[in-house]
Amino acid sequence: MLGPSITWAASLAMEEPGPLKRALIDATAGAIAGGISRTVTSPLDVIKIRFQVQLEPTSSWALARKELYGSSKYTGILQATKDIFREEGLRGFWRGNVPALLMVMPYTSIQFMVLHKFKTFASGSSKSEDHIRLSPYLSYLSGALAGCAATIGSYPFDLLRTILASQGEPKVYSTMRSAFVDIVRTRGFRGLYAGLSPTLVEIIPYAGLQFGTYDTFKRWTMGWNRYRSSHLSADRTDDSLSSFQLFLCGLAAGTCAKAVCHPLDVVKKRFQIEGLPRHPKYGARVEPRSYNGMFDAIRRILVTEGWAGLYKGIVPSIIKAAPAGAVTFVAYEYTSDWLETILT
């Protein structure tokens, strides 16, 4: 995920790092940025997961219509926040954060590193300012490939994070290690990759849309800046983007990607928690082998929960995308520039 260079003039003046140094910078900066972003936005992620794995309706409006299920544990963001705080305390909002960090940090590390490599290959230059000029198509392709590589490398931690975040109280697994051992014992090592197929199907359009639309929104904004500056000064045009404009571009791109790909994230979560023996107060559980593949899962969710079932957790998911993207971009840029000054 490419954000603005803090000082392009300074980066141009510095010696361009070699391939190994560049990979180390991208990987380290990506890991740090991912860790900070994930910790800051953990409460929204926990609420989103609780919504996604709840088979009952997640809104009081749906309950009022007397749909299939008679009661729901969580019926809104504020209600879920109050319940989690009352029953699990402040720590409940960071439930599963350790495996989440173990998932996010290698994910963002691999993603930034692979993304930079693909964009360097596509543009013929390792400079970030040249990458911005790539077509949206190449941005889409680079983002999709980077997302696939990062997903495969970090997926077991994503599964453990989901299980620990969704189990509630009383806990089924007290530690990440106990969850890991039980999954391997009952489902084999393949169990650590439950839901990988819908995840990969999701990450291709998600990462692609995120980077492709991000570049598109940036091009539009740069065009607007050129138009505006040309009317203010006849002898000078400026198309540089402000931090706020870049934030808005990232927010718009993230929102588009989330809205399109969220149903596949719901399906992935259902596969990940199959058979998890949660307390009955959290509602019906997903029984082992409830779904015969991704398309069967989508069909069953539509039949029993309607279209709303595929968008459970969409509100906290989109709300989370804004600060998560902003923190990731800012942390990555500052860390990357700092590492460049040290290593070059």
Image: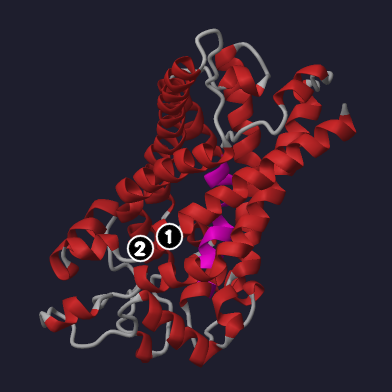
Q: Where's the C terminus, which quadrant?
A: top right
Is residue 144 in view from this perspective?
yes
Instruction: Give, as a three-letter code, the residue at label 2.
Output: Val
Alpha carbons under labels 1 and 2: distance apart? 6 Å
What residue is pinned by disc 2?
A: 315
164 to the left or right of 312: right
Q: Position of residue 155 (x, y in %)?
A: 54, 53
What residue lies at 47% left-to-right and 54% top-to-bottom? Answer: 321
Residue 126 placement: quadrant: top right
Disc 1 and disc 2 in contact, CB within 8 angstroms? yes
Image quarter of the N terminus: top right
Q: Residue at x 28, y 75 (%)?
A: 58
Residue bounds of the magenta highlight: 150-164
Q: Which residue is mark 1?
A: 319
The colour scheme used here is secondary structure
State the residue in front, 343 or 147: 343
**Amino acid under label 1?**
Ile
Picture layout, residue 207 above or below residue 164: above
Q: How many numbered markers are drawn? A: 2
Q: Is residue 159 magenta?
A: yes
